[in-house]
Image (spheres, rainbow, N blue to C red):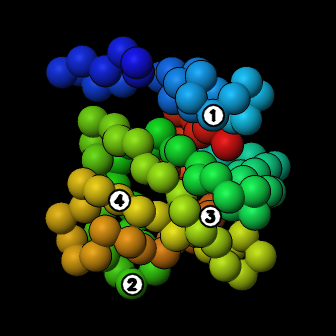
Amino acid sequence: MLGTTEDGTPSVNDATRVLNQQLGKGKYHTVEISDAKASKAQVDKLKADVVAAINAGKPVVANIAGTMTDDNGDVHSYEGGHYLPIVGYSNGGATVKIADSADTVGSPYYDISTDKVANWIATRGYAA
């Protein structure tokens, strides 16, 4: 349904499309962070989207690429890209909880600041 091949899933727009097909039209929308670094406005938008989505009982799907260090100091690296569900938040949305099924460093659940996640998403996007 996503159009995933050996090269991966083409776009977060595909995740949004399939989520809406499965859960109902208009449940998810795509937000792109097209620059190499997220602006303050984009970080604030991600925080608001995460809080609203989690409070509505749905995860946010982030399309990330690169390497990032979580709040425990563990390094997570997906140079070719990866999709991560954001399943929770704390500190008013300043910190998010990731459920990473491909994680090879400790627990598949980890916390990371939302501004770091926004920059991990940069050049890509998320479905909320």
Q: Amino acid at mark 1?
A: Leu
The numbered mark at residue 100 is 4
- Quadrant where the image shows the N terminus: top left
> Which residue is depicted at the point 59% across and 22% down?
21
- The tag earlier along the polypeptide, 3 or 1, is 1
Q: Amino acid at mark 2?
A: Asn
According to the image, label 1 marks what residue?
A: 23
Q: CA distance from mark 1 to mark 2?
A: 34 Å
> Which residue is depicted at the point 27% across and 36% down?
80
| Residue 67 falls in image quadrant | bottom left
Q: Amino acid at mark 3?
A: Thr
* Label 4: few (<14), some (14–19) or many (≥20) C-alpha neighbours in 10 Å: some
Where residue 37 appears, as percent x and y from the top left, is: 59, 45
Q: Nearer the viewer, residue 96 or 36?
A: 96
Q: Secondary structure at mark 4?
A: loop
Q: CA distance from mark 3 to mark 1?
A: 26 Å
According to the image, label 2 marks what residue?
A: 72
Contact, CB < 8 Å: mark 1 with mark 2?
A: no
- The tag earlier along the polypeptide, 4 or 2, is 2
Q: Nearer the viewer, residue 42 or 49?
A: 49
